[in-house]
Amino acid sequence: MVSHRWDRCIDYYDQNVKFFFAGHFSESHRKCLFIGGAGFDPRATQMVRDLEPILKTRLSCLLIKEERPNPDVKLINKANETLQVYKDLKINNELLLVNIFAEDNAVVGGNNTVSRLADYNLSAYSDIVIDFSALSIGISFPLVKYVYDKVREGSEPINIHLVVVSNPELDSMIVSAPNDRVTEVRGFPRRDKLHGEPEKARLWLPQLSGGRRETLKLIFEAVQPHDTCPILPFPSDDPKRGDKLVTNFISELEDEWAVDNWAVDARNIVYAAERNPLDIYRTILRIDDERKPVFESFGGSVVILSPLGSKMLAIGALMAALEREFPVVYVEALEYNVDWSTTDKVVYDNSKTAHVWLYGEAYLRDIEKSTS
């Protein structure tokens, strides 16, 4: 059996996340850097509000505000409300303004984030908490990869924690207007396109999500996969969520994503537990493990990820991409539109939290083995 990097991953959910915070961060020697979004998303401040009473002056926050051209006034006001919550906590906050697009509309958010992070001394902290709740994948994926690689280079096993306040219903209510350029996430390029590389069998794993049809259409046309395995949430809080997504994407599954006149086979559908990022992590790696010997004699295979929608599933996809260097392909959002009439109720009623301990002292034996 193939062993995976996070086979013995430590993770917590919902109330147990608070229990872990209370026990772990109450130790007086711990100094924590919290990195999260400072945008309009109403989930942006929940995690730091849980951490601040425990850590107090031992907590520092690096807040990333994603800057896009011509944002809606309502979004600006919501982002200002988020910043005010951080200011009211009276902790050490630093705001990082990150331009997502260059003047020629090229996507540069990931590059800008990583270049700015190079100015920070991560070794000054015992723990780094990265909150996915209000960050786009174009920022969160390069951010985690940079921190993960940087920490692994050091001599001390600094703890890296990934946290998220997940709400698939809210995710579907945040509608993005996509850019017209398909982009590889910074740090997760398509090496199968390098000059001189043999053509590999391309398997595309898109995460189906409401309001992402145009985005996924653009990605499919750019990737031109030989096969597609759509990812659906199951089990899910809404037992019919997967069925609704299949209905929404029926033309893509039966026609537009067909290869050699063959529609996407029902057996190709990948089911992932909506509230457990480790489930999709293990599933992606198992698919890759099974494909390698099959295509070894035909130039090899490449798994291409498009983790759109649920942030919980995105964390699992990120972990798989970190381990196997899978390319991650997406379309950056030019702007967002939100129906604010019901968001507060949706956030209050249905949000779930998750914590994944990505790296650090919990895996000290594994770290010592990898560096010896």
Image: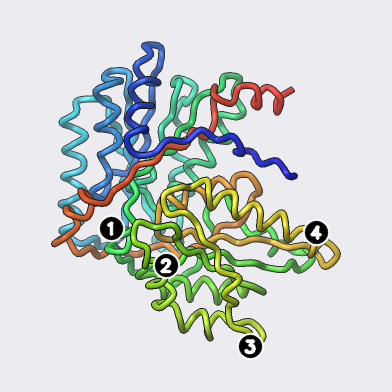
> Whole-percent x and y of residue 3?
70, 41
Q: Which residue is mark 2?
A: 242
The answer to whether the residues at label 2 and label 1 have Cβ atoms under 8 Å apart is no
Q: CA distance from mark 2 to mark 1?
A: 16 Å
Q: Is residue 333 above or below residue 147?
A: below
Q: CA distance from mark 2 to mark 3?
A: 25 Å
Badge 2 crowding class, 10 Å Cα cut-off, few under 14, some 14 to 19, many 20 or more, is: some
Q: Amino acid at mark 3?
A: Asn
The numbered dot on residue 189 is none
The numbered dot on residue 261 is 3
Badge 3 crowding class, 10 Å Cα cut-off, few under 14, some 14 to 19, many 20 or more, is: few
Q: Residue at x 43, y 71 (%)?
A: 215
Give the structural element (helix, strand or loop) at label 1: helix
The residue lying furthest to the top in this view is 28
The numbered dot on residue 293 is 4
The answer to whether the residues at label 2 and label 4 have Cβ atoms under 8 Å apart is no
Q: CA distance from mark 3 to mark 4?
A: 26 Å
First of labels 2, 4 by sequence position: 2
The residue lying furthest to the bottom in this view is 261
Q: Is residue 120 above or below residue 29?
A: below
Q: CA distance from mark 3 to mark 1?
A: 36 Å
Q: CA distance from mark 2 to mark 4?
A: 31 Å
> Whole-percent x and y of residue 151?
55, 29
In the figure, residue 102 lies in which quadrant? bottom left
Q: Which residue is mark 1?
A: 170
> Whole-percent x and y of residue 98?
36, 47
